[in-house]
Image (cartoon, rainbow, N blue to C red):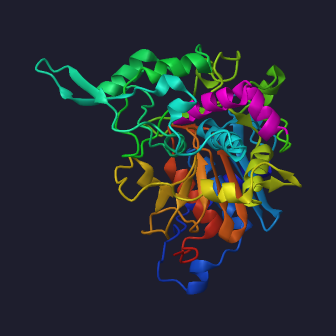
Amino acid sequence: MREMLLGAAALALILAGAPAPVVAQTRTTDAATSLRIDKARIDRALAEMVARGRATGVSALIWKDGREVYFGATGLADREAGRAMARDTLVQIYSMTKPVTGVALMQLWEQGKFGLDDPLSRYLPEFAAMLVQDGVDAGGQPLWRPAARPITVRDILRHTAGFAYGPGETAAEKAFGAAQPLALTNTLTEFGRRIAHVPLVYDPGTQWRYSAAVDVQALLVERLSGEKFEDYVQAHVLKPLGMAQTGWSPPAEYLQRFAATYILGADGKLIREDEKTMRAFNFPKPAMTMGGAGLVAPIDDYMRFARMLVGGGTLDNVRILKPSTVRLMSTNQLDARVTEKQWLPSKGNVGFGMDFAVRIGRPLSAEENRGAVGEFFWDGAASTLFWVDPANKLAAVFYVQTKPFQATLHRDIRRAIYGDAYLGPAGD
């Protein structure tokens, strides 16, 4: 009931013509650099998301200075069942799976299993002879040449390998679509065989482009550890962190706690995604455990992962990574010559580390997401988001299940947490 009242209260303010927040870059230095968590402001932001029909249900959890400073949930996890968004709601986090995979791989790096600048083919020989398009012939058919250099392990961690992530306009993307490496009927080994025979979209190291590289990371974890990828992650990341309810294929009885996914149409209405698509990664268990998607987690479980990162790789006296490894992963890895970055600039004044976007400077405009230099984060296809803000010793997890990806929800939850005027520390 409280959640529904919050939504109604926010809607009343909106309809009454309450003024919208105004970003003022000229506010005091204190407002620009200091952070105070305003619980009422965050409550209002969550309620507005539901009241405006941008989501059926949302929740947010914030830890700061070693303690929980905010939890709130409003709206419905399952509109048709009338089930409220709650603390134990299970959410499909899609690409927020990627940082978990990156942590698993970097554990093996700490053990000396590989070097970051080693050729990927040293461990996955199927990737030894990658091709890149070199124009077209007289008949308009693509011409291919060997890639200018080998793919390195660092490339698959920072999305500079050259892989595609689905069908598209280029010949390489069309080949990717035809090969269907990410079909859930493939094993990880079959995925690797298929994607290794698809040409690259560009030469390794020359562009940032979101791709299936994190699924290649999963294959590398499997090959280096000698364990199935899912088993390795459960044993070495999820179980040690106490993420007991997180997994790719949770028990069937958990279905009653799943949040449904909703598609926001051009008419502004939310339509429930069909059940088969909604559960594809999880039920029945697919042949492939993806490194780039598929995890299901309650908000407290994922916060344990985020808190481990705030803690420099350790949570509750359990070390998952060394502090230096977390710093490496959360440091921009993109060479200054990498100027083509697909849609990454839409995330703000950021670079990219290892499976995290990394804020490298203060917001450059009033419209940009609020945040602090040095923060690192990632999100998911259904608009979920998490970030770690070392400057403020803060971790935040935001849950929602709206497709397609709604960047404005991230803008609003960040402004609710930081305030419109916040710019964070000046940085370098």
The residue lying toward the viewer, choosing from 232 and 308, is: 232
Q: Residue at x 35, y 56 (%)?
A: 337
In this view, the residue in front, 413 or 167, is 167
Q: Position of residue 411 (x, y in %)?
A: 53, 58
**Magenta range:** 213-239
Residue 20 visible to an observer of this rendering: yes
Mark yes or no: residue 11 visible. no
In terms of depth relative to the viewer, which is nearer, 186 or 337?
337
Give the residue drawn at x 74%, y 31%: 258
Residue 102 appears in which quarter of the rendering? top right
Q: Is residue 113 left or right of residue 410?
A: right
Image location (x, y in percent) of residue 128 = 45, 27
Residue drawn at point x = 39 percent, y = 28 percent: 130
Relative to 281, does residue 394 appear above or below in the rendering? below
Give the percent coordinates (x, y) of residue 321: 75, 51
Residue 15 in the image: state x and y as whole percent. 55, 58
When asked about the image quadrant of residue 13, the answer is bottom right
Residue 138 belongs to magenta span: no
Q: Residue at x 47, y 40 (%)?
A: 268
Which image quarter: residue 134? top left
Q: Is residue 219 magenta?
A: yes
Q: Is residue 125 above or below residue 114?
A: above
Q: Nearer the viewer, residue 346 or 112?
A: 112
Q: Is residue 104 above or below residue 289?
A: below
